[in-house]
Structure formats: structure tokens, C-alpha cells
Amino acid sequence: MDTPEYNRFVDPEKMEAMIPDQGPKEMISTDFQEIKQLARQGYWARNYTLRGKVYQRLIEDIPCRTVTPDASVYSDIVGKLVGKHSSTNFPLPEFVDDSMVPTYCLNPQGEEAVRKILLCIANQFPDISFCPTLPAIVAILLHYSIDEAECFEKTCHILACNDPNKRFIDQSFLAFESSCMTFGDLVNKYCQAAHRMVVELSEDVLQVYCDWHRWLFGDLPFHYFARVFDVFLVEGYKVLYRVALAILKFYYKVKGGQPLASDNVKQDIRMFVRDIEKSVSPEKLLDKSFAIRLFSRKEIQLLHLANETALKQKGITVHNKRQFVHLAVHAENFQSEIVTVKEMRDIWSWLPERFALCQPLLIFSTTQHGYSLARLYYHCEGHEPTLLLLKTTTKEVCGAYLSTDWRDRNKFGGKLSFFGTGECFVFRLKPKVQRYVWVVIKHPELAKSSASEPTTSGLQLSHTASTDPSKRLSPFLAARHFSLPSKAESMFMAGSNDCIIIGGGGGQALYIDGDLNRGHTGHCETFNNEPLCSENFLISSLEVWGFWNADIQE
């Protein structure tokens, strides 16, 4: 391997077969959009030296804090910090998960260097409380650094990024867990078949999705991870969501319907990722990743912030170490006349992760409160979101997840008007289970994310005054963020003294009269749904559930 400046920490026998020093030797462009396409195409992937040069340039271009530790700082502190330990037993910082320290074809000197660099980073970044992905980043940068000090400087530059629109590394358990919940939300929307399989095979889907960083920063073979890292340095964090979603899609395609290779789906996905070469090439993995039409970066930021807020309400702060966050309906006190515990758990698996943290709380039922829409409003106002369930006299069961407080209906002066967000969905449970989400999620070509709205740090501010900081941000998937062809694609929920309507445009997904006695269902443009039960039905019972914020277990 003709790369003397970069191969000091690498086992050449392992690397020769993976990244031959071939292909172009210089970059052909300085334009960001062109570099973005070159990264996706793997332009520098076959030339070890060129990749090192590109990494150097990309990292130097990351905007970061004025005072950022550099190579000279490393030279000053490394002897003092590692001198206390034997060379064969450098400890890992507390913020590192010991099971996520990949070797990535490094020789023993390189493996030792990773631990030394991590110790020095811990010394210079005392605010990092949880960062299990950092060893993989140090390990890959060590490939493309002439010495430990240069690798330390590059890593510090990434950690010190201060561009609010270009996030790179989670540095607290709060940020890490929020990203896991955000990934779960994206799986729920973009990988519905794989999500159903995970729900069937796991009691707690969040514990499966909390491994998504591990799939990328540890389980992926080095030459796959290097291709992902190429694009990550150019485009930022959103790339990681794309690749992890693609991995899950391929896992379902290869494994769906087959018995698990291990005793649980969490381990089975990790085994699949480690052996991904048997199923998918790096090129196909990235092609699939960029074929997924994700929400805009702004929408994902809003979702991440909403998940952070939910965790803060659970008592998690930036200083917390790892905790157990449970997403499941507890069976002990659950009672419903419409659904079983298992059926409620299935519904729970469809919810946004920040609300799946909660336990169901029955706030209205026709059995307890009578068949009165006025009473339903009285008991539901102040609760956001809510889950509506109904059973017909012919024992069909359907319902809706409603993202917005019912008292918002009062903002329109008594006029029946639609409100809510794109997180609303409708579903049926009996006789056949089927969920219908906002049509824009399945068909993003219907709408373009609006880029003209005023922002603060890239985030749209709400026009509604509120003393609650968590509600100052515009909600995730608010219709005003999108350029929709008509209002028919955003008719989520409406209510008056005479009726409730869920889903509109060409029909209504669910209409319920003021006596909570009769209703009808049909196709609507907002959810592009089939009828949820018999088109005209009589209601046997109706329940509305809120969300109780149970404590997180230590």
C-alpha cells in the first residue's frame, strides 16, 4: 500500500483486500453539490490517500468553536494522562460504551492509540456525558492521520461543530436517546413492514431501535462504514438515519418470514449487519439509503426537539448516564371495553415515540360518561394528543390518533374547521388490522417542504403564545411547513357541537354525530384510506385515551 503517511496504525494485510489504492488521485471539484454527489458515488473510496486528503479538507471546513483543542494540546497532555496507566490497559472514558470499540483493521499500536485519544478528549470535553459512537469515529480518522495528535485534532473539530444546521455527534444520553426515538418514529413511517415484524418479535421496540447507532458505528464492516462516513462528513447526521433505515429495509427483505438466527430480533439485526456482505453491497446500501425520501432537515430537527422535551419531562438531563426507557403498555391496570392489552400494545407501536413513553389513561368512555359529544369535549380538553377508539354494534373496531387538543376547535368562532398535524392517523383493528397515515408520508411528491418561513436556528416558531417552552416551536409535520396542492391533503380533525370529523377531502375517514350514536366512514384524501368499518354504522361503545407520563426506571 503506497500510503506511508497514513498507514502507521493500520494492519496492511487486512487493508489491502478492502481499499486498494486505485482510482482518482485528486479531487475534481470544490462545489458543495458536486462534492455531495461524488461522496455518494464513492469517488474517493478506492484511493486511500485521496480519502485522507478529502477528510482533512472536509473537517477543516466544519464551523466550530473559536477555542478548539488542536494537535499541540494533545502533545502537551497525552503524557500526563496516559502515564498513570500501563500501555496495555488504557481505560475508556465513562461516556464510552465498551462494547462499541471497533478495531477497523488497526494494528495493536492503532488500537492503543484510540484509547489514548479518547482519554485526552475526555479531558478536554468534560461536558460529554454519553457518546458511544466516538470510538468508531476516532478509529476511522486514525486511518487517515499521520499521527495521534492529528487524529485528536480532527475529532475535536467535529465535536466542537457549532453550526445548528449541521449536527454530527450526540454527546449526552438525552441527545442519544432522543435520536433513538426519532429513528423509531422514522421507522414507523418509512419501514412499516419491518416495524410490524419488530413489534411482533419484541416486547419493547425502543430497545431494538436503540441499537441503530451500533449498527453503523461498530457492526458494519469497515469498508461499508467508510463509505457511510464519506457522506456523513459532507451531509451530516441525516445520512445516518437514511443508512440505518436502509439496513432495516434490507433486513426485512432478507429475513422476513424466516426463523431468527439468534434468540431475539435485537441480536438478529446486529448479526445481519455484521454479515451484510452476504446480502448487500456498499453501493446498493447507499442507493437504497438515498432512495428514501425523508422529511426535511427542519422537520427532523423539530421531531428530535419534541423527543428531547418528552425525555426532559421524564427527568432526563444532559448530565444523565444511560437509563432504561421503556415503551410498552403495562397490563396490570389496563381495562377497556373495546380493545385487549395486546391490541393496545399494537396501537402503541404506531404512536410517535415521545408519547409511547407514556401509559394509556382513559379520559372518556360512553359507559362511564354517557353518549354525549359535549361531555367528550369536557373530559378531553387539555389533553394532547388523544386516542379515539370505537366499537360498532356489529363488533367492528376502528379509531384515530389525534395529535391536537380538541379545544383548538374553538379558535374558529364556532365554524367547523380542520386543525391538527400530519402525525394524525386512522386505523381499523377488526375485522382486519390496517393503519392509514397522512398521505404526504406515503407520497412526498405531493408536497415540498416550505423554505420561505421565518426561522430561528433553522426552526419555525409558532404563532401561538405560550408560556410552555416546549410549545414555542411549531409542531412536527404542521401543514403550514409544506406546499400542498390543496387543503384536502391537510384535513386532519374537526369538531363542532354537532359532530366530529376525522380526515377530509373527497369524503370523511370518520364522522361521528353529536349523540355519539351514529357515524359513517369512507375514503378521504388526507389519509387515502379505505372505509374503516361498515360505511354507515351504529356505535356500541366509544373511548378516548390520553397519555400518562409514568416514571423512567433507573
Image: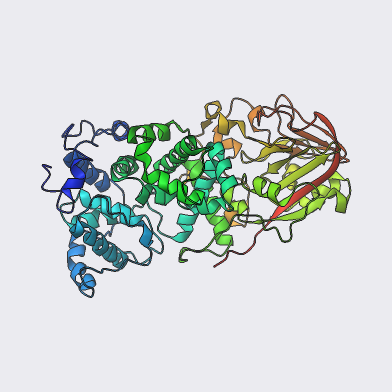
Which quadrant of the figure contains the N terminus? Answer: top left
Residue at the far bottom in the pictured view: 84
Which quadrant of the figure contains the C terminus? Answer: bottom right
- Any part of residue 90 in sight: yes
Q: Please state if 103 lies on the left or on the right of 352 as rendered.
A: left
Q: Please state if 286 lies on the left or on the right of 78 as rendered.
A: right
Residue 211 rendering spot, x and y as whole percentages: 45, 52
Residue 397 rendering spot, x and y as whole percentages: 77, 39
Up-down: is 97 above or below 213? below
Residue 220 rendering spot, x and y as whole percentages: 35, 46
Number of labels in the image equals 0
Of 465 and 86, nearer the camera is: 86
- Any part of residue 405 in sight: no
| Residue drawn where x is 61% and y is 47% of the image | 349
Of 280 and 325, nearer the camera is: 280
Colour scheme in the image?
Answer: rainbow
Q: Please state if 53 lies on the left or on the right of 508 as rendered.
A: left
Of 308 and 457, nearer the camera is: 308
Residue 277 rendering spot, x and y as whole percentages: 34, 38
Quarter of the image where one finds residue 45: top left
Of 481 and 224, nearer the camera is: 224
| Residue drawn where x is 30% and y is 40% of the image | 227
| Residue drawn where x is 76% and y is 48% of the image | 544
